[in-house]
Image (cartoon, rainbow, N blue to C red):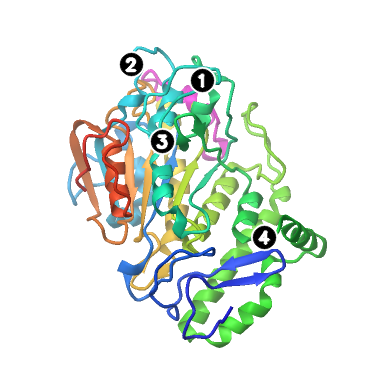
Amino acid sequence: MSLSKNNISRRSVLRGLGTVVALPALEAMGSSLGPSTGPSRALSASSASDAPKRMAFLYVPNGMHMDEWTPSSEGASFELKNILRPVEKYQSKMNVLSGLTLNGARPLGDGGGDHARSVAAYLTGAHPRKTGGKDIKNGVSVDQLAADGIGHLTRFSSMELGTEASSQSGRCDSGYSCAYSSNMSWRNESTPVAKEINPAAVFDRLFGNGSVKEKGNAKLKREKYKMSVLDFVLEDAKSLQKGLGSTDRKKLDEYLFAVRQVERQIVGVDKLHLPETDVPDYPRPAGVPREFESHVKLMMDLMVLAFQTDSTRVQTFMFTNAGSNRSYKSVGANMGHHDSSHHGDNRDKKSNIEKINVYHATLLAHFLQRLDSVQEGDSTLLDNSIIVYGSGIGDGNRHNHDNLPVALFGSGGKSFETGRHIRYRKETPLTNLYLTMLDQVGVKIKSLGDSTGKLEL
């Protein structure tokens, strides 16, 4: 690999024993496009239009306390209610979308099971078959349609992440398979895409290279001698830095520092011993942080690195599985999430659910801050992304699937105007938003689930 200043591209990587460290966008890179086996798209850092467009879908269960979610006014002059105030810094880069509906999550004659349906239908727009057996049937999710269309341009077509393990069988919600409750990404009608919840596994996926044996030897060496992945690519890094200008050297240093910080957190996971949470059905694999906030932030940092290096352009993240009854005592939310979402107009329960909603938005703010801190020419990683945050249930007490809580961050490289609260006509399908997003990343399809056309943004 040549690392001269004149021909660095996004295909260039730092290599070592069982290790590959993809490069972020640098000014020294050209503007050529095209697939490769490594991070594949070269980026002219001075041109926002050349930056890859990314999309991510972040899901929270049990709906929202809608009174403190929906802005009172529409257009650019809207004021954020309490739940979204943690992301107030990014109001000019967000759109709050009201009036969107997920018809596939409704009973449609199948009775209970709104939590399972809300996750299964969230990215597919389909109505999942009610079964607790092997004959599951749903639909293809928007992230996998995007992965099919643009996934060949990156090392990984998509990444599916979360904090609680996916299931492929069992009964979880009123006769619905646990596959519906714990997976929102679906490759086809009968195949959910299991999410990864172990930060170490995600890190190894991003920075591992070579044969299984080579990757294993590198990992053993790192653990035995307390080495960093960066130690294996030190020679390449030094060679690269010699040919870079001061701005690029600074950007590369900041990126490598971020990689090392994430790695240090992963190595220190076993030290994160806090009291067990009230989630008896949540098996915690070795290497997964005990503290929920540390777990979420670590996964989000890895998502940023994956986007920053163009290792993937499509990601999903589930804060927890459907119907989660996790409590968040660290923020004063002592009642379980699911229990308090069924507030029955009880003041204490409504206060509890609002605290949980605010807390999740605070974690979202961490993700947005990291994205917005990465410069890509005159834009940021956030500017060049479309981040969907929300739930497939509106008010958790009503279990409704219309007027969903949906917030959009970033503009996909200035593909649409931001800084607005947009209220759509009643019963406008959520899947119309997905058609628009797919169109903006160059994936042309006629319909998705119950879509009726592209959404005006």
**Mark 1 — residue?**
135
Please give left or right for residue 422 compared with residue 186 in the image. Answer: left
User: Considering only order in the chain, which callout, 3 or 1, is on the residue closer to the N terminus?
Assistant: 1
State how far apart marks 2 and 4 are (Cα). 49 Å
Q: In which quarter of the image is residue 130?
A: top left
Q: Pick whichever, 346 or 32, lies toward us.
A: 32
**Mark 2 — residue?**
108
- Magenta residues, as a range? 325-347
User: Considering only order in the chain, which callout, 4 or 2, is on the residue closer to the N terminus?
Assistant: 2
Task: Examine the structure image and report whether residue 370 is included in the region drawn in magenta.
Answer: no
Q: In which quarter of the image is residue 216?
A: bottom right
**Mark 4 — residue?**
264
Q: Quadrant of residue 89?
A: bottom left
Q: Which amino acid does label 4 sit on?
A: Arg
Mark count: 4
Q: Do the residues labelled 2 and 1 touch (CB within 8 Å)?
A: no
User: Considering only order in the chain, which callout, 3 or 2, is on the residue closer to the N terminus?
Assistant: 2
Q: Pick whichever, 207 or 174, lies toward us.
A: 207
User: Considering only order in the chain, which callout, 3 or 4, is on the residue closer to the N terminus?
Assistant: 3
Asked whether residue 81 is in view, the answer is no
Q: Nearer the viewer, mark 4 or mark 3?
A: 3
Q: Which amino acid does label 2 sit on?
A: Leu
- Mark 1 lies on a secondary structure that is loop
Disc 4 packing (10 Å; few <14; some 14–19; many ≥20): few
Residue at image position (28%, 37%) is 447
Q: Nearer the viewer, mark 2 or mark 4?
A: 2
State how far apart marks 4 and 3 are (Cα). 37 Å
Label at residue 140 = 3
